[in-house]
Amino acid sequence: MKKTFITIIAILSFSIAKAQTNNVKKIDTIDITSKADSSRDIFTAIQSEAQYPGGPQEFLTYIVRNLKISPSEFVRGVVFVRFVVDVDGHIKDATIVKGRFTDGMKNKILTVFNESPIWKPAIQNEKPIRIMYTIPLNLDY
């Protein structure tokens, strides 16, 4: 009896598994490498990072020198700025993604980023590419 019950369960299991495999849908795939357009794509991990002339510390120095916020517009805290370094090294699409700020602060921060000197662009597969960064600005002065 026990053997018969196990045999019936095994046959039913096989039948159910076979029925399920017959209902499997085929999924089409796309080769994204053949359609990549490095002038429009934005990468977040790459072979060679974009570089500000003189390095990250110089970029911070540039921001401190050029960011002039009046006391009436200033809000103390950390502001996160997201931006894209384009294939030509210009900063594009700067935006504040997190933090407390006034409209005046926002405009001045974005102006400083958008008017940044030209960066050395990021490189992927021997070609310049767009890359997105998000950096925190500690506005505690």
Image: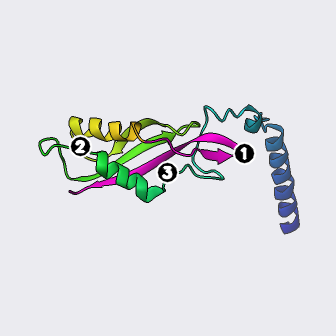
Q: Which residue is mark 2?
A: 101
Measured as percent of width and height from the top left, residue 12 is found at 82, 51
Amino acid on which disc 3 is placed = Pro
Q: Nearer the viewer, mark 2 or mark 1?
A: 1
**Is disc 1 placed on a helix, strand or loop?**
loop
Whether the magenta-drawn stretch holds residue 133 is answered as yes
Residue range corresponding to the magenta coloring: 117-141
The reply to whether discs 2 and 1 touch (Cβ–Cβ < 8 Å) is no
Q: Which mark is residue 126?
A: 1
39 displayed left or right of 28: left
Name the residue: 31% across, 41% down.
Answer: 109
Name the residue: 57% across, 36% down.
Answer: 88
98 displayed left or right of 5: left
* 2 or 1: tag closer to the N-terminus: 2
Residue in the foreground of this view, choosing between 64 and 129: 64
Residue 81 vertical placement versus 140 (above, below): above
Q: How far is mark 2 from mark 3, CA to CA?
A: 28 Å
**Is disc 2 placed on a helix, strand or loop?**
loop
Label 2 Cα crowd, 10 Å radius (few <14 / some 14-19 / many 20+): some
Residue in the foreground of this view, choosing between 21 and 49: 49
